[in-house]
Image (spheres, helix red, strand yellow):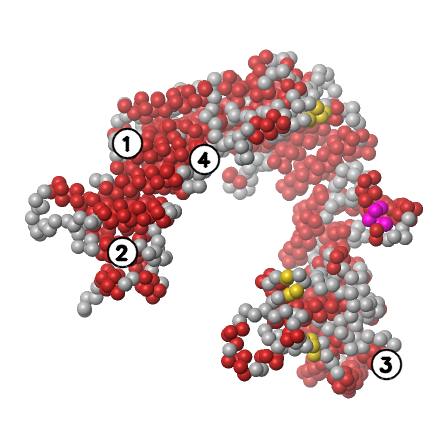
Amino acid sequence: MYTKRGHSVPDSVWNDPEFRENHFRHWGELPKIDEPGFELEWILPNQKDVDLSLELLRNVIVPRIADLDKFMDAVPSKQEATANQDNVYFNKVFVLLRFGVRALGCLIPPPGAPIAADKLADAIVDGHDASSMPTRFRIDGQVAAGYVFTDPDSEQYREVAGIRDKIGAVIAKALDYMVAHNEDDVENIKALIRLTHDYMCHYGMDRTACSSLRRTWNSGLDSFTFDNSVCKMPRYFVTKRVMYIQAARLLHNSRFMSANELAKDITLKLSRLCLSLYSEVRAHAISILESIMSILPETKYPLIPSFLAELDEKEDSDPEKMIGALHVLDTQPLRRVCMRDWHYFPQLALALCRAQHEDKPLVKKLIMNIAVTQVVNLSAPMPAQTITEPLLGLVRALGSSLVPSLDDSGFEATVAQGRAKCDESYQFAQTENTKLVSSLVDILRDAGTTWRFAAIAGYYVDYISSASLSPEPRLMGTLAENLTSDLVLFRESSAINLTQQLGIIKHRSKLSFPDIIASSSRSDVDLGGKGAQALTTLPFTELCERALADGDTSEAALTPYLDNPSTGWFTWPLAARVFAVSQQGGALAYGKIDPECQLAYEAVRDILFSDGKWDRIAKLFSQESSRSPEDDNFGVTRAAFYTQVFSLYDCSLLELAWPAIERLTLDIEKTGAQRAASEMIAGVLRGSKHWSRESLEKMWGLVIPLLSTAFSKLRPDTLRFWQTCLRFAFARRDPRRFLPLVRLIIYGNPFDPLSEAPFAEAAKIELLLLLINSWDWRIVSAIAASKPRLHDALAHPYKQVRDAAGILMYTLYSAEYSVSYTNAELAIDDLARYGATGRDFSHWAGSQKTQAFIKEMASRVNEWKADHIPSNEGTSNYSRGSKTLLTFFLAGFSYSSKRLAIEHIPSILPMFSVLQEQNDDEEVARLARAVMQFFSQILYTAQMSEGVTSKVLALLEESSNSWHVITKTLPLLCTLTFSNRFSLSREVRMKIVDTTALFLEHDQIEVRQIASKSLSSLVKCASSNVIADINVKFSAKISTRLPRVRYGKPPKDPAAYNRLVLTRHAGVLGLSCLVLAFPYNIPDWMPKVLVLLAGCIDDPNPIQSTVQLTFAEFRRTHMDTWHEDRKRFTSSQLELLTDMLVSPCYYA
């Protein structure tokens, strides 16, 4: 059943001669479906067609089935079976049966439940099985799809069904025959596999064809609309829609057929071909088997054990069979089952981990791919969540609306039944999980396990861990032992797994014992709209400064820790999570361990506290990367492992591990030792979060002297390790937790501008910058109170120090800013006073001290300018101070907030404009150009944009500027105008255009050329009135012709003549701007402008060259559309322009 031809009009109209002659007049007409002339017709089988089909089946298909069955019963010898004539015979029969099966799919529905009433929705989606279809589109049963025979009791139905069963039986027999007697006949086996696919999956419609029809219909659906359920679209797309719906019905029915014993038998025999020695046969068989398992899900479960058995180590193990089994296990149907079903997932995981007996690269690659896919997508068993009363009420109301007969008792019984089922599934998964972990531990402990498969086992252990399951002691002991394995992968995997397992122990211990320090120190404080005043009477921005100055017993030091760094910057919340300051005493942070985790805790403890363990850990984890030294980076995963270890086992473990840590830290010559030391100390610092006061004092007594030595001997290749170490430790931690370390960085070895060790001083600045980047506004006052001598680095002789100082100074002063409203109500009221857009926090001039410092820097640079001698080639204080000042402002665009930069750069523009032409120092010129470029690209507010623009205009209008400064500033003014064109007033924009136009009469031709380009860009965004004014203005400038001057003789009045040439050149440049601003169209005024420019072609240079370039560019941009553009000109204008636009010919 299908539709007739899908022309855009019905056949009666299509065949009309008058329509064929005038078909173009009907383009775009969209007939309605309900119109009488739509004439969408179906091709339906009549009785003759049905009789012919049955006759073909009886006289062609049935005899071939019998002949094939008889041929296979003869069981010929292998030589006879492989004869050429027999191969041809097999191929013919298989192809014939294949087309017969396709015809049978249109005669009767697939075997299964009887066809229900025609209730199919229009939108049946494609999927692997019914469970993958959205609920709103799912119909649990077959539907009407235009089958010829639908009555199972009719004689024709039973006849057709019998023929189909005969074909299925002969397919099953042929599969056995080909495997047993003809396994080398690849082409016939492939033909048999295709026949099997059509028998099992093809019921009137192929999945690929249905997808093609769906794509065609979707393209029409995206192009046309529906109006009140009336479709208006070309008849062709409507036809495709009808065909797609019919195809979707047929494909839908194939998803709901039942798998009888014959289908299961065929699937089982087909699975043997998936293990064939020939890759072509395997590929075809696996593809067909995947389609069968998608349509008949129940056929896949008996196949899993047989494919898993092929991965076991046996005497007759065949790598080709392993490859086939792995490919099958990687198909979508089996992959989903083995990831979700705990009946099969443990079996596959263990089979993959134990399949290390085969060395073929493809086998190893497939094993790794399957394992990674599983690991990424699997999850540990999770218990059913408790249903809340509101959710239970919602479900009860929904259930009563769907099933009116469901009363309260029935609902409770249904919920209880579902809960019991979930609990049963969880218990089973939990039991299997325990068994799997135990088996994986055995694999990890087996000395014969290779690194590749041990890594796979480690990945599985990592991802099946869950806080709801207690860690397994044997596993924990094995992982702790593998920390000192000779294989890098073992060590890294064990560290990752232990990190997660120790986190589970900590989590369960806090839940089991809320009174331990790790749990009791945390609390949620109600701020009550008072902001930081609810925590302390001191300004929160000064807490760290006061704690450093007043000591550990001061109010600032005893105020609860607030670890979230963003809390309070803009506004304080109603409540905040804080942590109590460590108390006196030697209580352990985790003094009690969850009873179910106690054995695992002790297993790790016994190994980590064993003699020499940390010496071996330090030695192995400090080994440098086998690749280049640049690839030997700080390991965050290793630092996280140390964090969990020291957090759980407290200061006693630190005392045991400290000799190894100290030895690594003092070994400054080895990069790997410094990296490993930084990772361990990062773990110590971060893991001491809940330690007691006594433990913290011991820790700081060990750490501070060692870090003081390490920081004084930093090298360029080790600085990055210690920077990452501190960033890792400081992340989301209150700075007052690290007061001894902060005191060391700020006061321990302060910056010395007179030092001759540039890297050492730059490293000190980098550490200060790290503090600001970690804690921002909370640490600024503490650093400022130390009064670092950054001002003296303004003209430091070393670039490394200057750059670091410039960035630090800008970051330090910009971080002073914080809004810190006491509560959200005050913030809302304040923002409401500034209009609908709220208050603008994008710019801030800084505190009075900051403003004075910036002015002092600029004034010092100006003072040094007087003593600057260009011949020194950039070695003067002026050049060095200029670089530092430029770096200071560049930091605002590259590293920090732009608040200070956009407030202070306008006042220093004259200085920066001069620095752009610092010819004796290219670096100064480059930095100045970068600052000016960034400055011009900022999107300013409406209030600031006009002030900034006026500063730039004033800079251009200064008579003291050299022409070099003007050529650099004009493009920036143009960029500034484009970036803020919507916030600039009309008067300011006109002033920009007028100022740019003035420079067309500048004495220096380079200035005139740059001004011409800038004006052309401005004209593109100008209104028609502005363009008209420019046209009139510059047309008047060329109205006065130049006096005739004889060749070789000077003009009578050279000064007047030169002024007139300059004026006419300005006029030509201005009109050229208008022409070049419209490269792809011809406005009404352009023909007259071109005629005026053509009249200047005989003027002396640079007027003549400007005219020539203008017409050359006009010809280039209008070449493709000149056949249309020439209509905008009169005949006289075209005649005049022909000589200008046509290149001269040598032979003319």
Q: Which residue is mark 1?
A: 958
Left or right side of 708 for 181: right
Judge by depth and name the residue closer to the eye, 192 or 677.
192
Q: CA distance from mark 1 to mark 4?
A: 25 Å
Q: CA distance from mark 3 to mark 4?
A: 87 Å
- Nearest to viewer (mark 2 / mark 1): 2
Q: Quadrant of the N terminus?
A: bottom right
Q: Earlier in the sequence, mark 2 or mark 4?
A: 4
- The amino acid type of the residue labelled 4 equals Ala
Q: Which residue is mark 2?
A: 1088
Q: Is residue 315 above or below residue 868?
A: below
Residue 398 located within the stretch drawn in magenta: yes
**Residue name at image x 36 percent, y 33 percent:** 950
The label shown at residue 155 is 3
Sooner in the amino-acid sequence: mark 2 or mark 1: 1
For marks 1 and 3, give the one nearer the viewer.
1
Camera-side mark, 1 or 4: 4
